[in-house]
Amino acid sequence: MNAHYPHLMQPIDLGGLTLRNRVVMGSMHTGLEDSVRHLDELAAYYAERARGGVGLIVTGGYAPTKRGWLKPFASEMTTRLQAMRHRDVTGAVHDEGGAIALQVLHAGRYGYHPLSVSASNHKSPITPFRPSALSSRGVDRTATAFARSVALARKAGYDAVEVMGSEGYLINQFLAARTNDRTDAWGGSADKRMRFPLEVVRRARELVGGDFPIMYRISLLDLVEGGQTWDEVVALAHGLEEVGVTVLNTGIGWHEARVPTIITQVPQGAWRDATARLKAAVSVPVCASNRINSPEMAEAILAEGQADLVSMARPLLADPDFVAKAAAGRADEINTCIGCNQACLDHVFQNQKASCLVNPRACRETTLVLAPTRRRSTVAVVGAGPAGLAAATAAAERGFAVTLFERSDSLGGQFRLAMAVPGKEDFAETLRYFTRRLEVLGVDLRLSTEATDAELAGFDEVVVATGVVPRVPAIDGIDHPSVASYADVLAGHVVPGRRVAVVGAGGIGVDVSVWLTHQPETLEDWKAHWGVGDPSLHAGGLTEPKPREPLREVTLVQRRSTPIGVDLGKTSGWAHRAVLKQSGVTQVSGATYVRIDDEGLHLLVDGQPRVVAADTVVVCAGQESVRDLVADGRHVVGGADVAAELDAKRAIEQATRLVAAL
Ligand code: NAP
Ligand code: SF4
């Protein structure tokens, strides 16, 4: 029995397959699945996670038919040739002692192409294409195609499959009255709506026999209007057990749901109660997922009997050695996923390959390699923000002798400020990770130390990562006592008054506005504010949201005339914009700053004067690079290089790439 996480590290028998522990790497589309050209990279990506000890890997989704593609020419598992090509992927995982399941996913009306089909012809709010309604024969053929993909997965050497029945994809579209108004044998009553997934699993089981695990991802809470009732979810689960499902994995929320389910601001373990409720109603093993990112949370869910397995997708992207580190009692060395979505889901939704903000090697295992160096060189890194931390740890990992200079008495730079923002508390984990990594790698860390040119002259390589300072805009009255920078406010050096004007509505202006208005909330409050209710009382688990009570009266201002927050992350920006609205933040676009005085912030909007009465004016007008130490022969990374794109994703990746090439 493992001394650190006894439940998490316990093997589990799934009939024909024994997993070495309870950790499932959840399905996540990375973009590497969509072309045979990337199969080697995909194999390396999974193999690294298998080497890191994960119990079962679930691939990104593979369509059972072309009409089920996620986008044109996306991944599919429809021919024997495709199955044979996957043998390199499954073989690579098996060579590392791991197990891998193929996920079969039919996108239905989420397919981003004109051939998409669904139960009915209702267009989804998140795709421009209206699907065709499948004919009765078409539904029948699609169920058979699912089963054939499952059988092909077995031929490809996969140890199991996952049938994707949640998140609003085709199967979910059949299940919910919202998207299924058919009148044939595949729609109408709840029983008929359930027939499609039951046929999929029944036919798959017939083809693969009894000893091949079939996992089914069931939607516990649809979080959309017209979603399934809890009784329907349980009836489906019972039906799936009868037709031979091996494990029920759990999904929360359709992609079109207007309730965040996995981003940073969702409290950790927010959905474990729903999983426990399903577990109490069925006899097959149940897998918890969504917003679980630490071995402690995973262990607690298992120890409390809320689930039998725990699925984590992004945390395994962030750290391939998550399981091995936890098992060895080195959880403090885990590079924790911070739920930002910036390099994973945001990339995928923008048609780029996924990676990870805190681990830029993710999905680049074969191209971004930190190989041991043969040089006995010394490296000085100046500045311990994200860029400097990434440079110092990557250089030490390669075997360079590294000294890290930091002027202040703590690590993190601008990143440290982010963790003060409500819902971004996990950012502290990145600093914990880097702090520990510096110790493990023996980096000579010099806090409260200003690096001088004379000192730097003694190093073979110098990396300048001195970051940024907040920009002070040229507004009349900017030196008025009511004015503070976002850095001073978030660091707690200035306590803002009750009425606040925020100058600048980039990512930080939005974050600061949330910080200014936020009242501490419990998980129950959080659910109430987003309108998440008891699924036995409210279909889809959706109810009337409870209004927030903002702590302060905030006006957020920008000069551009575009709506505020349009440039925020693709998959999280909408939630930030929703919180601004829920918190009653007044938003002003197209403003010209006139002056700041005792009355507040004076503007011109559409040529008309307007005064934002404010006790405090918080400036969030971007940043400027600190480049005092930039010189020929030195490398420059992060905000010191480009302040305009100040961004931890770019900073960490740039620093890692630089060091990989030293
Ligand atoms: P930013 O996104 O560049 O926004 C700066 C804001 O200041 C803009 O609204 C700009 O809008 C305004 N501004 C620029 N120069 C000004 C001037 N001279 N006078 C008055 N206003 C001026 O910078 P940020 O908000 O500091 O964020 C920095 C980076 O942090 C971002 O690039 C982002 O990558 C990251 N971040 C992201 C998030 C997120 O996605 N949730 C959150 C926090 C931080 P106008 O010119 O229209 O006034
Ligand atoms: Fe997690 Fe952000 Fe990395 Fe995605 S990019 S895996 S959300 S840390």
Image (cartoon, grey):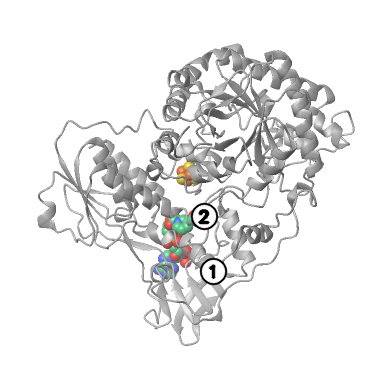
Does the Cβ of the disc 1 residue fall within 8 Å of ligand 1? no
The answer to which of 250 and 586 lies nearer the viewer is 250
Q: How crowded is mark 2: few (under 14 residues within 10 Å), some or many (20 or more)?
A: few
Residue hosting label 2: 567
Residue positioned 51% across, 63% down in the render: 510
Disc 1 element = loop
Q: Where is residue 464 in the image (x, y as percent from the top left)?
A: 23, 52
Q: Is residue 45 left or right of residue 581?
A: left
> Which quadrant is home to the C terminus?
top left
Name the N-terminal-most of marks 2 and 1. Answer: 2
In the picture, residue 198 is in which quadrant?
A: top right
Residue 349's place in the image compared with 537, above or below, is above
Does the Cβ of the disc 2 residue fall within 8 Å of ligand 1? yes
Disc 2 element = loop
Residue positioned 71% across, 36% down in the render: 109
The answer to which of 529 and 600 lies nearer the viewer is 529
Q: What residue type is labelled 1?
A: Gly
Residue 391's place in the image compared with 2, above or below, is below
Q: In this view, does 180 lie to the left or right of 578?
A: right
Residue hosting label 1: 590
Q: Where is residue 99 in the image (x, y as percent from the top left)?
A: 52, 23
The reply to whether residue 289 is in sight is: yes
In the picture, residue 205 is in which quadrant?
A: top right
Q: In this view, does 478 lie to the left or right of 263?
A: left
Q: Which amino acid does label 2 sit on?
A: Asp
Indicate the quadrant of ligand 1 in the picture.
Answer: bottom left
The reply to whether residue 505 is in sight is: no
Between disc 2 and disc 1, the foreground one is 2
Q: Distance between the residues labelled 2 and 1?
A: 16 Å
